[in-house]
Amino acid sequence: MGHRRHFFCGRTDFDFTLTKFWVNGKRGDSCHAVIDESGLLGEGFHKRTSELRDHYYPLEVAPDLSPEMRVEMMVEWVTKAHEAMVAAGITKDILSAAVSKANLLFRPGHGELLRWVDKYGVPLLMFSAGIADVLEEAFRQHSAEPLPSTSRVVSNRMAFDEDGNMTGFVGECFHVFNKHASSSAVKPYFETDEMRCRSSVLLLGDSLGDLNMAKGLSAEEILTVGFLNDKIEERTDAYLKAYDVIILGDGGFDFVLELLEEVASK
């Protein structure tokens, strides 16, 4: 990371990377859980999404599952979850209300991180397997700082009719293991002159799948920082092998901010 900040850019996950895993003594809400756990969409919907989470989350983090099977399971999960949302009758007003009551908290230091990005005009790609509409509403309602002007959100995005009723999802379907630079959703972004000169990359994630955000990049330097929030003992070895730096126990952005100050001084 010895390059000047003019050659620096960031890639980050959202759920449990920019946000905390533990909130108010229980697991925090992911973008999907903001809706799933809202209690605003009827008992049948919430029962269905709870069943899906109980079945698929253990498969997402299972250390002995093959990469191929893990991807297959994540595609199934996202597809079924999205089908349930469409059937439930989500509206823009319900989405806003769900975010308002969500058990969601940004990590300590996130405001300083976003101010640094904005101050130095550093491109920041937020690549999430969650829901873009929920992510952006979470920034409006819960973040100490707005989304930086240089940020770009790539995630599953809802479609709404003129009355604000959800009709489906638009564009590519993202899950935790297909967020990579060669995706058709982000490839043109990386091929711009502005991004081609960004030869140093800081990547932030909380799952092994988040490392796919580095796939297809031609950067000279990529520093990866992983937040290991859950099942720490059984996953530490795998994270140490995969990430350059890991932060245990749902910690804040102290290390990342120190690193960015060093970048700013170059």
Image: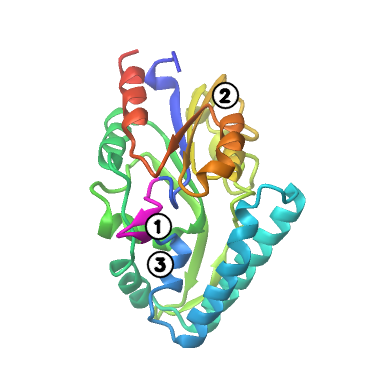
Indicate which label's residue lies in the foreground, 3 or 1: 3
Q: Is residue 20 left or right of residue 222?
A: left
Check if residue 25 falls in the magenta segment.
yes
**Is tag 2's residue or tag 1's residue first in the polypeptide sequence?**
1
**Is tag 3's residue or tag 1's residue first in the polypeptide sequence?**
3
Please give the residue where the numbered disc 3 appears in the rendered image. Answer: 34
At label 2, counting other C-alpha atoms closer than 10 Å, the crowd grade (few under 14, some 14-19, many 20 or more) is some
What residue type is disc 3 on? Val
Please give the residue where the numbered disc 2 appears in the rendered image. Answer: 219
Residues in magenta, as a range: 18-26
**Is tag 2's residue or tag 3's residue first in the polypeptide sequence?**
3
Q: Quadrant of the C terminus?
A: top left
**Do tag 2 and tag 3 residues touch (Cβ < 8 Å)?**
no
| Above/below status of 72 relative to 48 | above
Give the CA separation, mark 3 to mark 1. 10 Å
Check if residue 240 falls in the magenta segment.
no
Question: Residue at coordinates 33% horizontally, 57% vertically from top-left?
Answer: 23
Nearer the observer, 152 or 79: 79
Q: Which mark is residue 135?
A: 1
